[in-house]
Image (spheres, helix red, strand yellow):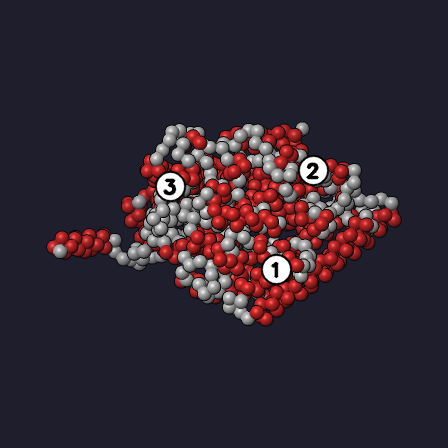
């Protein structure tokens, strides 16, 4: 009993000391940076060099963490912190993740997860946005090598590398389809300027939206985004672009 | 010359990729056309029984304790998962199922468990799933065969169609629904467990279920239900995917498949389908009256009849164009399927299910692709809506079909007028160069 009392006193003391060290806030961005340049300089410099700080409208500490110190990690770690900026819950980035097995597990189990777990050592049963893209708390741009470090918390290196190679191969196929469409437009003789511009816009959409969906599907392991929104949709785009070229040329040809 | 060099480089990089991984260099494809294609390295993870080669970087025999000790550092996620599973601590006094049980104890000879391996303990479930084959396509048990026996799977680059195997691997490994290494039946009972494959334009089962009264109630309350309960009457307030499709935990989804994925018209009243209808009605009757359940099934028959009347009209439109040689590009002006050797001499545009249009969604004219989308996307949206009592999807699907048919008619009229003028003028446009060459199309042709 006495032991428990002593332990309780120690805990209260430690708790108070920790609270003394960091006031609760609210803090401004400048205050976060000033303190964390001393406390965790790696995080600050990685953030400065990464895409969040360099965006036209920079994503600040407070954007994801809020301005109070207590619970700041727990606020930033769940997927909800990322989605508002990254296409929303119905965008292809979110949907490709949510329909993957990782996303399904997160949907089912995240309400019970302890978000104070660090983003490493498989602290969560399935990876979240931050688990891979900010693995081990990295605040820079997640490179493929960073992702590999996250994947091998659960998967063998051979599986990870084989899967990455397969994704690169599949993306290359998608790029070939876009290139075929672009070269078909460029190589079509006799198109007027308006037709050329309209077709150029179609190719740009194919590359931005459809190839983007394929890339999201490959990165997030969504079969649907790899296939129906990705490869099979690129096939459809290619057909429609070629058909539009053909229609323009046939109208402008001898029979028109 | 430059193009040839580029293809050579791409081939080289693809073959280096496979050399780095564990698959045998002489690995062959499987299925009807298996001798015509070679798998990609990644295929071993989707069909381990056919392709997996053990990793030889670590050698030696290990006890389960040693496996866990090492993998707690190497891959902590799978160790945590296994430790939280019933395999690690069976409740009924059985021996734990350890790493060795499924993978073997020789690290140089580790195997990936196949459904047959799981079936050594889970004999009922494995037996049920294998018995599902008797119902034919579509089914979980035949899903891998369905994929690799498709002509577009054989035709297209294997790096591209690796995407297909991810869902079709439901036949070749059990963790599609019971994710490794927890293998939790409670997870597989949740509707989300199905949506990785049962979502997207041709099978929006997720949207249909969540839009139904059943699904809305699940979304509102499901997180609080006890998912450890078997899929039986009285255990759940509303049915979920597995409640109906894997009734009583019976691992068969095809035993009630009347409309066969909605891809072809069927007679829903054959003697076989009468048996299946009784099975459906019995499930609905867990909560609803027999008369209601029977009527809902008939409503679905009516919806299907409506859809097929329109689909056949659209197919007639395409067949007329084909008959009048107005499809542009025509069959001989586009890349043939390499496995249909007679195509070179007798080119033929495929229209409808029975001619194999399910594989003809690329290298075809725009109007054929438009019909493919009407058939695969709009029609199936309505079908999935009707099957899951989601009227909003039925309405959206039907509206899409009506609009698609109008587009087809306009396109057909344009093809006709252009084609007739060109025929009269004696100088037809040659679509062949546009449709048979290009970065992707040429690579595909060279690979085959």
Residue B191 percent across, percent down from the top left: 49, 57
**Closer-to-camera residue (B197/B239):** B239
Query: Can residue A49 be seen?
Result: no
Q: Find disc 1 in the rendering and name its residue.
A: B275
Q: Position of residue B344 (x, y in %)?
A: 76, 37
Label drawn at residue B339: 2
Q: Kindly identify which chain the residue marked by label 2 belongs to.
A: B
The answer to whether residue A148 of the structure is visible from this angle is yes
Q: Quadrant of the C terminus of chain B?
A: top right
Q: Chain of mark 1?
A: B
Residue placed most toward the observer, B324 or B10:
B324
Closer to viewer: mark 3 or mark 1: 1
The CA distance from mark 1 to mark 2 is 38 Å
What residue is shown with label 3?
B98
Nearer the observer: mark 1 or 2; the answer is 1
Is B96 in front, or is A103?
B96
- Kindly give the residue lying farthest to the left in the view shown: A2
Dividing the picture into quarters, in which one does residue A25 lie?
A: bottom left
Position of B253 with respect to A5 (left or right) is right
Chain identity of mark 3:
B
Real-space Cα distance between discs 2 and 3? Answer: 45 Å
Q: Residues within 10 Å of mark 3 (few under 14, many from 20)?
A: many
Q: Nearer the viewer, residue B437 or B350?
A: B350
Q: Is residue B297 left or right of residue B124?
A: right
């Amino acid at each position: 009993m006495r032991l428990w009392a002593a332990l309780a006193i120690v805990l209260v003391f430690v708790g108070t000391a920790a609270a003394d060290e960091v006031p609760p806030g609210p803090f401004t961005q400048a205050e976060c940076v000033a303190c964390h340049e001393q406390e965790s300089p790696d995080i600050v410099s990685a953030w400065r060099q990464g895409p969040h700080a360099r965006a036209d409208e920079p994503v600040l500490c407070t954007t994801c963490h809020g301005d109070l110190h207590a619970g700041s990690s727990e606020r930033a770690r769940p997927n909800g912190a990322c989605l508002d900026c990254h296409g929303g819950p119905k965008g292809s980035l979110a949907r490709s993740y949510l329909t993957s097995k990782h996303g399904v597990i997160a949907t089912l189990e995240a309400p019970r997860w302890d978000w104070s777990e660090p983003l490493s050592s498989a602290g969560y049963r399935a990876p979240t946005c931050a688990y891979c893209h900010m693995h081990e708390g990295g605040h820079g741009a997640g490179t493929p090598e960073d992702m590999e470090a996250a994947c091998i918390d659960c998967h063998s290196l051979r599986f990870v590398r084989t899967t990455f190679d397969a994704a690169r191969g599949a993306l290359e196929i998608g790029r070939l389809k876009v290139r075929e469409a672009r070269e078909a437009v460029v190589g079509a003789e006799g198109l007027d300027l308006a037709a050329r511009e309209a077709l150029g816009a179609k190719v740009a959409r194919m590359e931005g939206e459809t190839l983007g969906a394929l890339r999201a599907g490959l990165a997030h392991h969504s079969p649907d985004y790899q296939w129906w929104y990705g490869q099979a949709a690129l096939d459809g785009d290619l057909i429609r672009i070629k058909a539009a070229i053909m229609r323009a040329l046939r109208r402008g040809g001898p029979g028109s | 010359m430059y193009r040839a060099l580029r293809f050579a480089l791409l081939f080289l990089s693809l073959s280096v990729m496979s050399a780095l991984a564990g698959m045998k260099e002489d690995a062959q494809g499987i299925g009807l056309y298996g001798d015509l294609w070679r798998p990609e390295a990644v295929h071993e993870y989707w069909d381990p029984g056919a392709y997996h080669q053990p990793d030889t970087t670590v050698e030696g025999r290990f006890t389960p304790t040693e496996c866990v000790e090492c993998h707690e550092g190497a891959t902590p996620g799978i160790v945590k998962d296994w430790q939280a599973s019933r395999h690690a601590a069976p409740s009924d006094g059985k021996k734990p199922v350890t790493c060795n049980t499924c993978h073997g104890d020789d690290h140089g000879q580790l195997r990936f468990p196949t459904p047959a391996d799981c079936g050594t303990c889970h004999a009922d479930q494995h037996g049920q799933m294998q018995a599902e084959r008797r119902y034919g396509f579509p089914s979980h048990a035949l899903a891998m065969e369905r994929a690799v026996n498709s002509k577009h799977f054989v035709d297209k680059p294997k790096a591209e169609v690796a995407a297909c195997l991810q869902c079709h691997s439901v036949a070749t490994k059990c963790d599609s629904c019971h994710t490794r290494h927890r293998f939790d039946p409670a997870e597989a009972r949740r509707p989300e467990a199905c949506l990785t494959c049962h979502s997207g334009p041709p099978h929006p089962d997720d949207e249909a279920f969540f839009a139904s009264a059943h699904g809305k109630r699940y979304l509102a309350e499901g997180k609080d239900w006890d998912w450890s309960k078997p899929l039986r009457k009285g255990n759940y307030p509303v049915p979920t995917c597995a409640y109906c499709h894997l009734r009583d935990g019976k691992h068969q989804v095809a035993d009630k498949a009347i409309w066969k994925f909605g891809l072809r018209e069927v007679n829903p009243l054959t003697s076989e389908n009468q048996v299946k209808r009784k099975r459906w009605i019995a499930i609905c009757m867990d909560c609803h009256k027999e008369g209601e359940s029977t009527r809902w099934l008939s409503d679905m028959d009516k919806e299907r009849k409506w859809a097929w009347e329109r689909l056949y009209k659209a197919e007639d439109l395409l067949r007329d164009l084909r008959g009048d040689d107005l499809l542009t590009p025509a069959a001989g002006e586009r890349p043939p399927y390499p496995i249909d050797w007679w195509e070179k001499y007798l080119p033929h545009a495929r229209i409808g299910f029975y001619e194999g249009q399910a594989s003809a969604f690329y290298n075809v004219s725009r109007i054929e692709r438009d019909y493919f989308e009407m058939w695969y996307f709009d029609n199936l949206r309505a079908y999935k809506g009707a099957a899951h009592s989601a009227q909003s999807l039925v309405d959206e699907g039907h509206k899409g079909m009506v609009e698609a048919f109008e587009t087809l008619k306009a396109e057909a009229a344009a093809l006709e007028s252009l084609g007739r003028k060109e025929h009269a003028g004696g100088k037809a446009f040659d679509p062949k160069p546009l449709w048979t060459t290009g970065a992707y199309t040429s690579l595909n042709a060279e690979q085959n």
